[in-house]
Image (tube, grey):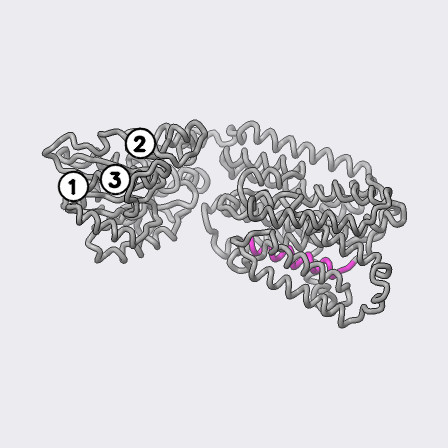
């Protein structure tokens, strides 16, 4: 937030006109930044805390427009002075954070992550982060936690506003165009684009300047009205007493409280929802420094102090929290998050005292502006080079080979090329159109047919096991093929991303999951295999599983086995090992485990206990009181238990089959070591 660095605003510049310093605006900044920090650290504590950014937008529009209007009115506006002041305010803290993030990433991030960070540093240095992030994913996506510079999108929007708005106002004054009409026209168009776009393309609407400028223009409108209120409201100019001011301030506070409380990630935001924090901030500013809330609360020493360091605090807090998420491999402890927030506050104070404040007092303005601009250019180049060199792999030589071994983890193309289509997963029994995927085309259309060996018995006198489900059913094949007695034949219809379902009652040419499930049920009814194993990812539907069991029993299947989820990792297991367990990898660990999956497994096992089906508790095989198994044998690379977040490697599949599944299939359960 550029405006965060403008405190306090003192009328010391001879060319630009600056409004009188208002401590209550610093207090409002404090509330805004604290809400954002609280949301990022503890999302459940203040679910709408992210709207603090919208408060910043209004403050920014108000202060910057006040400067421009005052300077134009005095005929003293200078583009050079305006932008050199922006450089002096914004660049010092931003450079420090960008350099610190790059340095920290050198030691922590893997090549692909460091490559992405390089792109974001380049985008942040050029103030186009919002466009870079718009092309990747949404602000609330799961991947957001692993982007240390995600928060710079708002800085990009503000800087883009600062490039356009002074020029537009200057031109309006020169051409004698009414500035109020300009604000209303541009702001109204921006708000209309926002309301329309949030429905059709919410990600683009969140990140695009044309759909967010209206929030800054609310501040501009307030600045214009404040400066010319006697002319605009001539008949009511005497109505400006404490009752009016306190009503404005209280109404603004209510708007902010409602926005912080009711706005959620699931709302269509910004849209109409962004009006609450924007109008709330405008009302509080309009109330003036002498309204009771503004004077007694917002102007308090603590809030003013936080407001003064709010810009570096905003810059520091998210990279630190993001690196914690990356290193922890999931949800960090409350203590860790609290300590991280206090570290961010300390760094913000140090940045303000030893970087921002001394540079503001530095007298040689041209030298300062040139040096800061040159450093920002160097920072941009460093980020771009990091991106183009694919994350400077030479940093982590000991892990490069290990990382390359696991390049076939989803969603990489090699997952399908080396794993999904191999004998380990029996990819020929998959209705997903892999060839279309590999050619860069995603389609729901199933392949016309699968290999007949997937569903045709070749050994008439053998017993038959039929595997049905998604990729978590596919992973069982390699182990069962090796460990099951030769008197058993394994058939399989299992399609990636398609949990077993009893609802597919007819073939489909447009939905590969419907086709896969219809075909699997058809073949099971025709073949009447001795045993059917239904394997799928952790989001099981208990009601559907019970229905499947009844259908299979009616079809004459003797044994029906539902496999529970495998241990799930919040970050792919190879990455968890490389980041946090590299020096001494434990055989069992809780580091990075998705505990919610373990809880759901226990609940599912309990709910299916009396269903008549056999529940195969895979987590019980791989986990104990110390955590879950990371590798088998002596070599971590070849013995790792999961390629990614939860798919078993062939060696883990064989372990599971030998220790557990073969016994369940044959009716002779084996003891688990």
Q: Quadrant of residue 443?
A: top left
Disc 1 crowd rating (10 Å Cα; few below 14, some 14-19, many 20+) is: some
Residue 642 placement: quadrant: top left
Q: CA distance from mark 2 to mark 1?
A: 23 Å
Residue 240 image offset from top left, x and y in percent: 81, 68
Residue 353 in sight: no
Q: Secondary structure at mark 3?
A: helix
Residue topped by disc 3: 520
Q: Residue furthest left?
A: 461
Residue range of the region highlighted in magenta in the rendering: 22-41
Q: Earlier in the sequence, mark 2 or mark 3?
A: 2
The residue where tag 2 is placed is 427
Classify mark 2: helix, strand or loop: helix
- Viewer-side label of 2, 1: 1
Q: Nearer the viewer, mark 2 or mark 3?
A: 3
What kind of element bears circle 1?
A: loop
The dominant secondary structure in magenta is helix
Please report the residue visible at 71 percent of the width from the left and 66 percent of the height from the top.
249
Residue 110: % across, % down: 49, 35
Could you tell whether 192 is left or right of 75 in the image?
Answer: left
Q: Residues within 10 Å of mark 3 (few under 14, many from 20)?
A: many
193 vs 662, nearest the viewer: 193
> Among all residues in the image, which is located at the extreme bottom?
243
Residue at mark 3 to residue at mark 1: CA–CA distance: 12 Å
- On residue 627, the disc is none
Q: Position of residue 199 (x, y in %)?
A: 56, 48
Mark 3 and mark 2 in contact (Cβ < 8 Å)? no
Q: Which mark is residue 528?
A: 1
């Amino acid at each position: 937030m550029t405006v965060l660095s403008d405190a306090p605003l003192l009328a010391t510049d001879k060319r630009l006109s600056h409004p009188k310093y208002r401590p209550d605006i610093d207090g409002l900044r404090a509330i805004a930044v604290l809400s954002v920090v609280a949301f990022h650290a503890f999302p459940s504590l203040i679910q709408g805390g992210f709207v603090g950014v919208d408060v910043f937008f209004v403050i920014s529009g108000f202060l910057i427009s006040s400067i421009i209007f005052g300077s134009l009115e005095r005929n003293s506006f200078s583009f050079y002075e305006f932008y050199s002041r922006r450089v002096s305010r914004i660049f010092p803290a931003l450079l420090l954070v960008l350099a610190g993030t790059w340095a920290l990433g050198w030691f922590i991030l893997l090549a692909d992550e460091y490559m992405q960070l390089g792109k974001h540093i380049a985008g942040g240095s050029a103030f186009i982060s919002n466009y870079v992030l718009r092309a990747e994913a949404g602000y609330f996506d799961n991947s957001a936690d692993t982007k240390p510079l995600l928060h710079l999108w708002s800085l990009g929007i503000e800087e883009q506003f600062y490039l356009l708005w002074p020029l537009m106002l200057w031109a309006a004054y020169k051409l004698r165009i009414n500035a109020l009409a300009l604000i209303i026209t541009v702001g109204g168009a921006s708000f209309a684009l926002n309301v329309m776009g949030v429905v059709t393309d919410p990600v683009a609407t969140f990140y695009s300047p044309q759909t967010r400028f209206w929030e800054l223009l609310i501040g501009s409108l307030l600045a214009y009205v404040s400066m010319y209120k006697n002319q605009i409201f001539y008949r009511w100019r005497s109505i400006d007493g404490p009752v009016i001011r306190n009503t404005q301030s209280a109404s603004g506070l209510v708007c902010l409280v409602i926005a912080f409380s009711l706005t959620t990630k699931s709302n269509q935001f910004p849209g109409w929802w962004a009006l609450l924090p924007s109008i709330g901030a405008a009302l509080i500013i309009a109330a003036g420094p002498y309204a009771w809330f503004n004077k007694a609360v917002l102007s308090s020493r603590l809030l003013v102090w936080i407001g003064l360091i709010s810009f570096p605090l905003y810059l520091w807090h998210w990279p630190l929290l993001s690196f914690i998420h990356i290193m922890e491999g999931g949800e960090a402890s409350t203590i860790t998050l609290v300590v991280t927030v206090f570290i961010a506050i300390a760094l913000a104070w140090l940045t303000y005292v030893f970087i921002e404040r001394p540079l503001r007092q530095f007298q040689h303005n041209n030298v300062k502006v040139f040096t800061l601009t040159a450093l920002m250019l160097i920072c941009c180049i460093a980020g771009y080079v990091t991106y183009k060199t694919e994350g400077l792999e030479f940093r982590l030589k000991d892990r490069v080979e290990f990382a390359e071994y696991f390049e076939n983890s989803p969603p990489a193309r090699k997952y399908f090329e080396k794993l999904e289509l191999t004998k380990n997963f029996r990819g020929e029994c998959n209705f997903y159109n892999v060839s279309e995927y590999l050619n860069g085309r995603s389609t729901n259309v199933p392949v016309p047919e699968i290999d007949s060996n997937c569903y045709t018995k070749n050994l008439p006198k053998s017993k038959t096991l039929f595997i049905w489900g998604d990729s978590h059913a596919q992973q069982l094949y390699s182990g069962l093929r090796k460990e099951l007695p030769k008197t058993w034949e394994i058939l399989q219809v299992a399609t990636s991303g398609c949990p077993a379902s009893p609802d597919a009652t007819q073939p489909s040419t447009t939905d590969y999951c419907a086709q896969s499930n219809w075909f699997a049920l058809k073949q099971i009814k025709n073949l009447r295999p001795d045993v059917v194993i239904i394997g799928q990812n952790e989001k099981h539907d208990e009601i559907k599983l019970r229905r499947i069991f009844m259908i299979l029993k009616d079809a004459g299947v003797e044994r029906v086995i539902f496999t529970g989820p495998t241990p799930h990792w919040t970050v792919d297991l190879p990455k968890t090992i490389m980041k946090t367990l590299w020096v001494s990898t434990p055989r069992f660990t809780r580091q990075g485990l998705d505990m919610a999956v373990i809880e759901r497994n226990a609940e599912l096992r309990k709910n299916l206990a009396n269903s008549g089906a056999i529940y195969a508790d895979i987590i019980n095989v791989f986990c104990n009181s110390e955590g879950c198994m990371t590798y088998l044998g002596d070599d971590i690379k070849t013995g790792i238990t999961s390629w990614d977040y939860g798919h078993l490697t062939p060696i883990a599949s064989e372990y599971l089959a030998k220790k557990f599944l073969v016994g369940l299939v044959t009716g002779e359960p084996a003891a688990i070591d």
